[in-house]
Amino acid sequence: MAGVARSLLELGMPWWEFVLRAVAVYAVVLLLVRFTGKRTIGQFTPFDLLVVVLLGTAVQNSLIGSDTSLLGGLILAATLLGLNWTVGKLSAHSRRFDRFVEGKPVILVRHGALFRDELARQSVSEQDFAIARRSAGYATLAEIDLAVLETSGEITFIGRKDGD
């Protein structure tokens, strides 16, 4: 029994290497997700879910190396949660940092005119946009005064007033 406990708690590398690996992987993955567009976060499709699962598998060895100890996993979990908390705090206190991490909202429709170049730039297909539009209760583009791709990846709509 003592051998099992030892193997669960015995680290395969120094504790600080777990922290360093977690910081490096977190920063790189955060940047990659940030620069691949908001769709990755908000407009989830089965393909996007597959990418997220495979991304987790792809970076697993970068995080743990050859270590399989319980303690190593707990150090990684604590580091990743701490990084996430820190990014949240920094985002709440710094507009510049928040814009860097979260991006800014993007206008997709104004006065019924769809900006196809923005859809493409944000990796949102016209079909996905049409689904979001219909889900929001708008049958046509002419009914929309403004559609915004929010930093969360959600598309919000403001309808046209009568007489617009």
Image (cartoon, rainbow, N blue to C red):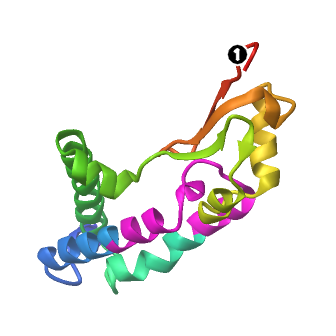
**Main SS class of the magenta portion in the image:** helix
Query: The N terminus lies in which quarter of the figure?
Result: bottom left
**Horizontal and vertical percent for residue 91?**
25, 46
- On screen, residue 66 above or below 118: below
Secondary structure of the residue carrying numbered label 1: loop
Q: Which residue corresponds to mark 1? A: 161
Residue toward you, 104 or 59 = 104
**Horizontal and vertical percent for residue 146?**
63, 33
**Horizontal and vertical percent for residue 7?**
27, 75
Asked if residue 78 is among those painted magenta in the image, a careful observer would answer no
Q: Residue at x 59, y 72 (%)?
A: 54
- On screen, residue 69 above or below 98: below
- On screen, residue 160 above or below 146: above
- The part of the chain drawn in magenta is 28-53
**Count of numbered labels shown in the rendering:** 1
Q: Residue furthest top?
A: 162
Three-letter code, disc 1 = Lys
Position of residue 148 in the picture relative to residue 4 (left or right)? right
Residue toward you, 163 or 13 = 163
Position of residue 19 in the picture relative to residue 125 (left or right)? left
